[in-house]
Image: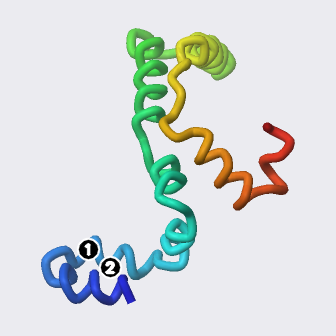
């Protein structure tokens, strides 16, 4: 029903965006089964962008690598350095972890 409302209100102005929602609705709607905190965790891109920026720092001055293995080793070492600096906890992490353990109890228990 909400998708139909979205289409009625914005369908004429944002044809491509609303069309993408309609074509991919089966995949998108699973997102709304989660709480707001989990949805925010899923679609937040800041940590990913930060990680990519750190990897670009170590690769930007190298125009080519002698082998693929050399590139992988450099990225591995850079990842190890990035992980040392990642100490910031997510807001409401305890609540998110509790909710994830409800949704994915069979997967998360071994990691707690």
Q: Residue at x 57, y 39 (%)?
A: 93
Q: Residue at x 43, y 45 (%)?
A: 44
Q: Is residue 67 visible?
A: no
Along the line of sight, which residue is nearer the eye, 103 or 63? 103
Q: Which residue is mark 2?
A: 19
Q: Is residue 110 visible?
A: yes
Above or below, comparing residue 105 to residue 59 in the picture: below
Q: Quadrant of the N terminus?
A: bottom left
Residue 8 figure quarter: bottom left
| Disc 1 secondary structure class | helix
> Is residue 33 shown left or right of residue 112?
left
For the residues bearing labels 2 and 1, Cβ distance under 8 angstroms: yes
Along the line of sight, which residue is nearer the eye, 18 or 62? 18
Q: Residue at x 47, y 78 (%)?
A: 25
Above or below, comparing residue 83 to residue 31 in the picture: above
The residues tagged by marks 2 and 1 sit, at their Cα atoms, a distance apart of 5 Å
For residue 16, the mark is: 1
For residue 57, the mark is: none
| Disc 2 secondary structure class | helix
């Amino acid at each position: 029903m909400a998708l139909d409302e979205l289409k009625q209100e914005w369908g004429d102005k944002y044809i491509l965006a609303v069309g993408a929602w309609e074509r991919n609705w089966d995949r998108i709607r699973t997102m709304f089964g989660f709480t707001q905190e989990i949805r925010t965790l899923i679609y937040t891109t800041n940590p990913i962008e930060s990680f990519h920026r750190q990897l670009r720092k170590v690769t930007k001055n190298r125009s080519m690598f002698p082998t693929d293995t050399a590139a992988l080793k450099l990225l591995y070492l850079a990842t190890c350095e990035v992980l040392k600096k990642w100490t910031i906890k997510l807001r409401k992490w305890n609540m998110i972890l509790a909710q994830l353990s409800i949704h994915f109890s069979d997967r998360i228990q071994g990691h707690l």
